Image (spheres, rainbow, N blue to C red):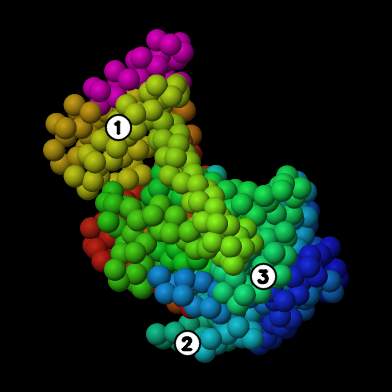
Amino acid sequence: MHALGLEHSYARELPDACVECPPEPAPAPRLLFLNAELAHELGWSLDNLGGVDAAAVWCGNRLPTDARPVAQAYAGHQFGGYSPQLGDGRALLLGERFDRSGRRRDIALKGSGRTPFSRGGDGKAAVGPMLREVLIGEAMHALGIPTTRALAVVATGETVWRDTALPGAVLARVAASHLRVGTLQYFATRGDFDTLRLVVDYAIARHDPQLREAPDRVYALLRAVVQRQARLVAQWMNVGFIHGVMNTDNMTLSGETIDYGPCAFMEAYDTATVYSSIDHQGRYAYANQPAAALWNLARLAEALLPLVADAADEASVREAVERVTRALDDFQPTYAAERLRGQRQRLGLLSDAPSDDADDAALAADWLALMQAQAVDHTLGWRLLADAAVGRPQPLLALFHEPRDAIVWLERWQTRCARDDATRGTGPTARAAHMKQASPWIIARNHNVEHALSAATEKGDLQPFEQLLDALRHPWDENAEHAVYAQPATPEQAAGYRTYCGT
């Protein structure tokens, strides 16, 4: 395989943060998916990616000549319990590539076999979970939410065993980086502060280069990550996305969503919704996601403390704790502002005067409370508001088994919209168009995802996957071809639905 223009800044600058490791060969690779749009972003043509040999390339059998596969080291709190060594147990970073916009992006394999960090598993992955990464990642990208993305999925021709025998697969994943909160925890826990500082400097150069000369760049990095994660989680909440496994090894410093294992989009609005089969206590339930993110960021702050405080100087430690606490205190107002910004767009409120913040937040909160009280579909409840904006409330009201309270709320909302119109000279038609670009018509509904994955896994039929993927890439557009994907799950499909990590 020819070279792909890969660089290796991570392996070169952080040799103690990774271990060289080759992928394990796949017996009979077969290409299931190749992301032409993402390849173009990276400056590659499909022929660059291997042409007829793409399956062999992206399962690791025939690596590009300039690939240097390494497994990355990291630790992590998993459901609150700390594991001092996790690391890439089934993933390999092949290198980095500058895309057409000049951004450095990681190119990695997932499911390519055991590494020195493997913890008893086989290091492999299955077709279903890897195709799930494609569907959810592309859905999030289309919704404008920062995310890692799938470049390719290759069936390996071997069987992996989980609860049952499953066809194996490898995912090629692209990320702004794979630096995690757990990366910093790994070195802080070991007292390896020299490498910890190198990781911080690398993270700043990669994601916040404007901070490189800042005298307090460690503190500044913490603030930047806090703000990125606050905005990210607010976006999750506004589309009803539930990550399911918000451990510190799954929180990136870049602010991208990573790891689409036990994740799902909410159907009927319910703040207590949990879809993950392993989240028995609801730690990462929908409503708990902001608090979980802040808890993770507090662990990041703890990991950074040795770089901003002299442990032997009590006053220095106290001052450092106060400073990182102030950085963490940025989370809630940043989250609230981003959440309200998205809600205003969905409500069609084009005015964002600070004097209206409290009233607009209450208007949105009351709408959500109405949907929860009557188990209204979260996506359609927001989307059909656009019809109500132009005098067609009936489709929306049909979602409510008792519409009286919804009618009262709609009158209050229309009064607020009229005030907007009076100050900005807008009207219902413009408002509805604006709202339809903020509230998706199509999300990755769980029953559609499961149907597509079952067909691919059990029958080798990729057509349902491809059709669903096409719909997810156009979440705002109403058309007859994709109408089936906008329909909520039936009560039977929704009852007791669970997702699994796929490891």
The residue carrying pointer 2 sits among few (fewer than 14), some (14 to 19) or many (20 or more) residues within 10 Å by Cα, namely: some
Give the amino acid at mark 3. Answer: Phe
Q: Mark 1 falls on what kind of element?
A: helix
Q: Mark 3 falls on what kind of element?
A: helix
**What mark, if any, has residue 415 been given in the picture?**
none
Q: Does 475 lie within the magenta span?
A: no
Magenta: main secondary structure: helix
- What residue do we see at 34% from left, 29% from top? 358
The residue indicated by pointer 3 is: 193
Residue range (magenta): 410-431
Give the foreground label among 3 and 1: 3
Q: Does 424 lie within the magenta span?
A: yes
Give the amino acid at mark 2. Answer: Trp
- What residue do we see at 77% from left, 60% from top? 97
CA–CA distance in space, label 2 to label 3:
40 Å
Counting residues from the N terminus, which is met first, the one under dot 3 or under dot 1?
3
In the rendered structure, the answer to whether residue 489 lies left or right of residue 202 reads left
Residue 134 percent location from the top left of the image: 55, 62
The residue indicated by pointer 2 is: 161
Check whether the beta carbons of the residues at disc 2 and disc 3 lie within 8 A of each other. Answer: no
Q: Mark 2 falls on what kind of element?
A: strand
The residue indicated by pointer 1 is: 362
